């Protein structure tokens, strides 16, 4: 699968240290265990057991580990219920697409489907991670962006698209100056209407707001339709705790 756009001053398609591109697994999930008996502690333990297996199989389960390979691989996700209709969201990295698909099925069967109504999105990582100012500082929040190219982008010439990419680089350099860590870019359009996913590690919602204002100033959104998600990062083990004892 080739990239829809080329390398820029900020982004490089070359995997770090010659590593093969990984598959991305994004989820947006809403609680549905309103009634007692639907989802219990035994299901939570079964889900955590599957997550342990996935970690042993080479999955990256924490966004922090994308930027710091020495960081723990304990599963983390975004607590999003305070601003969004869904309750949690997150991004994992799997060794390949086959692993991504089979891993999500195993999670669902272990009890995830009892607790959550989930939108799963899968893709392939096409750009390497980029470290912002204070990159190794543990940021407590995350910003996820899904976007698709619109009709104007489809009608643009290759020169216009290249010019647009480098204009957007101005905004991305501003993101890095704000301390944003960008987990590369993930191509999703092999199976979804969304063409790309961007996952950021940030220090709070104000940083996300300031960054998006920078993207608006360079007319980033003239060629895209976007969906944005902001949430506080928390241990997934806590976020999937049963509602009923």
Image: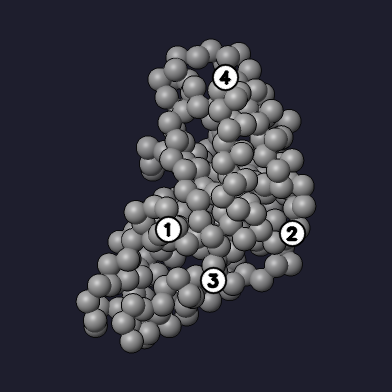
Front residue of 214 and 183 = 214
Visible residue check, residue 118:
yes
x and y, in percent, of residue 146 in the image: 47, 41
Q: Quadrant of residue 234?
A: bottom right
Characterize the local packing of mark 1: few (<14), some (14-19) or many (20 or more) Cα atoms within 10 angstroms: few
Quarter of the image with the C terminus in it: bottom left
**Closer to viewer: mark 3 or mark 4:** 3
Residue that numbered label 4 is attached to? 161
Circle 3: element type: strand
- From the viewer's perspective, is residue 46 above or below residue 26? below
Characterize the local packing of mark 3: few (<14), some (14-19) or many (20 or more) Cα atoms within 10 angstroms: some
x and y, in percent, of residue 52 in the image: 53, 76
Characterize the local packing of mark 2: few (<14), some (14-19) or many (20 or more) Cα atoms within 10 angstroms: some
Compute the Cα span from label 2 to label 1.
25 Å
Visible residue check, residue 189:
no
Residue that numbered label 1 is attached to? 82
Residue that numbered label 3 is attached to? 235
Compute the Cα span from label 3 to label 4.
39 Å
> Mark 2 vs mark 1: which is more N-terminal?
1
Compute the Cα span from label 1 to label 3.
17 Å
Characterize the local packing of mark 4: few (<14), some (14-19) or many (20 or more) Cα atoms within 10 angstroms: some
x and y, in percent, of residue 88 in the image: 43, 61
Q: Quadrant of residue 165?
A: top right
Residue that numbered label 2 is attached to? 137
């Amino acid at each position: 699968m080739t990239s829809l756009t080329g390398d820029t001053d900020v982004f490089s398609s070359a995997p770090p240290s010659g590593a093969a591109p990984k598959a991305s697994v994004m989820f947006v999930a809403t609680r549905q265990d309103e009634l007692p008996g639907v989802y219990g502690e035994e299901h939570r333990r079964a889900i955590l057991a599957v997550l342990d297996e996935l970690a042993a199989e080479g999955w990256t389960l924490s966004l922090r580990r994308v930027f710091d390979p020495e960081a723990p691989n304990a599963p983390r996700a975004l607590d999003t219920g305070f601003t969004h209709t869904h309750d949690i969201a997150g991004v994992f990295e799997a060794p390949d697409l086959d692993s991504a698909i089979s891993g999500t099925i195993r999670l669902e069967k272990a009890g995830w489907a009892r607790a959550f109504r989930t939108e799963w999105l899968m893709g392939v990582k096409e750009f390497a991670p980029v470290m912002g100012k204070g990159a190794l500082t543990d940021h407590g929040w995350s910003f996820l962006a899904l976007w698709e190219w619109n009709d104007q982008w489809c009608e643009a010439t290759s020169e216009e698209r290249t010019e647009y990419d480098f204009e957007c680089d101005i905004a991305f350099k501003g993101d890095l100056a704000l301390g944003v860590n960008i987990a590369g870019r993930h191509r999703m359009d092999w199976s979804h209407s969304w063409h790309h996913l961007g996952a950021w590690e940030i220090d709070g919602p104000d940083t996300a707001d300031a960054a998006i204002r920078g993207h608006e100033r360079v007319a980033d959104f003239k060629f895209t339709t976007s969906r944005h998600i902001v949430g506080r990062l928390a241990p997934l083990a806590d976020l999937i705790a049963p509602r009923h004892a």
